[in-house]
Amino acid sequence: MSKLTDAFTSGKAFIPFIVAGDPDETSTLNNILAMAKAGADIIELGIPFSDPVADGTVIQAGDLRAFEGGITVDKIFGIVKAAREQIQTPIVFLTYANVPFKYGYDRFCAQCQALGVNGLVIPDLPFEEQGEIRPFTQKCGLDLIMLITLNSGDRVPALAKAAEGFIYVVSTQGITGERDEFDHRLSALFAQIKEYTEVPAALGFGIHTPAQAKALSQFADGIIVGSAIVELAAQHGTAAAAAIGKYTAEMKAALA
Ligand SMILES: O=P(O)(O)OC[C@@H](O)[C@@H](O)c1c[nH]c2ccccc12
C-alpha cells in the first residue's frame, strides 16, 4: 500500500502546502517539522517555478521569495534529506512539468526515491501526457497524483481508475487562493469518483478556515491548504514555524 494512501486510514487527512525555499532552506525545514509535529498527514512541498500558471498572487510571491533566496532543485532535495532525519510524514512534490523534465525524469525520480519523497503532483501534465514520466515514477515507487476537476466530465472514470496514492480534487476552475464559497457540485463529484476507485480523494483550492475544512470533509477524505499557509510565511518570514504549526493544528483539529 502507498504511504500516501496509508495517511488517510486514521481519518480525514490534512495536507498543508508550502513553497520550498520561502524565504530560505532553514525556514522551510523548520516549517516542515512544525507542520509534521502539529499533525499534518501529508506535506505538499512546492518547487518554485518561473511560470506558475495555476497559482494566485500569494503563492507566486512565495515563489519569488524562494528564488530571491537562491533556491534550487538540489537545495530542495537537501531540505527533504534533512527533514527525513527527523520525520517520516509522507511528502509529495508539487512541481510544474518543466522542472523534472529539465532535471531529467530518471535522475529526478531516482533522487526522490533515495531521499524519501512519496509522490508527485504535476498540475500542468495532462493525464494523456503522463506516459513520458510514468515509467520513471513507477520504477522509483513514486505515486503520480491525479488531479480531477469539475470540468473533468467523462474523463473522471479513467482518471479515477489510474489514481495512485490519493486523488487531488480541485475545487474551482480558477487558480489557487483563499475563497469563501465552494461549488455545490463538489459532493457529487466525490461520490462519482468513489464509484471507480477506493483511492482516497482530497480537496484543494480556496480552503482556509477550520469551519470550511470541517464542512468540506463531510465528503472529502482530506483537505489541502496552500495559500493561507504561504501567507503566514510571508507575514512571519524566517520565524513562521510557530504560526504555521499553530494553524496546522487548528485545521487538523477541525477534521477530527
Ligand atoms: O492555495 P490554495 O487555494 O489553498 O490551494 C492549494 C494549492 O496552493 C496547492 O495545492 C498548490 C500550489 N500550487 C499549485 C498548483 C496547481 C495545483 C495545486 C497547487
Image: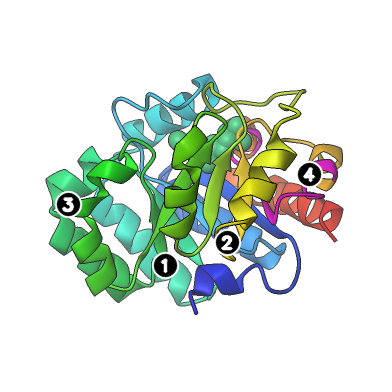
Q: In the visual, does 23 lie left or right of 41? A: left
Could you classify mark 3 by the number of other residues whose Cα lies within 10 Å: few (under 14), some (14-19), or many (20 or more)? few
Q: Earlier in the sequence, mark 1 or mark 2?
A: 2
Q: Earlier in the sequence, mark 1 or mark 3?
A: 1
Q: Looking at the image, which is closer to me, 192 or 231?
A: 192
- Structural distance between the alpha carbons of marks 2 and 3: 26 Å
Query: What residue sits right under mark 3 in the picture?
Result: 132
Q: Is mark 4 within 8 Å of ligand 1?
A: no
Q: Earlier in the sequence, mark 1 or mark 4?
A: 1
- Structural distance between the alpha carbons of marks 4 and 2: 16 Å
Q: Earlier in the sequence, mark 3 or mark 4?
A: 3
Residue 171 lies, in percent from the top left, at 62, 33
- Asked if the residue at tag 2 contacts the one at tag 1, i.e. Cβ–Cβ closer than 8 Å, the answer is yes
Q: In the visual, does 215 lie left or right of 203? A: right
Residue 78 in view: yes
User: Which element carries disc 1, helix, strand or loop?
Assistant: loop
Q: Looking at the image, which is closer to me, 72 or 226?
A: 226
Q: Which mark is residue 188?
A: none
Q: Residue at x 66, y 67 (%)?
A: 8
Q: Residue at x 24, y 55 (%)?
A: 74
Query: What residue sits right under mark 4 in the picture?
Result: 213
Query: What residue sits right under mark 1 in the picture?
Result: 118
Q: Amino acid at mark 1?
A: Asn
Q: Amino acid at mark 4?
A: Ala
- Structural distance between the alpha carbons of marks 3 and 4: 35 Å
Query: What residue sits right under mark 2 in the picture?
Result: 42
Residue 239 lies, in percent from the top left, at 61, 45
**Vertical placement of 221 versus 65: above or below?**
below
- Asked if the residue at tag 3 contacts the one at tag 2, i.e. Cβ–Cβ closer than 8 Å, the answer is no
**Magenta residue span:** 215-228
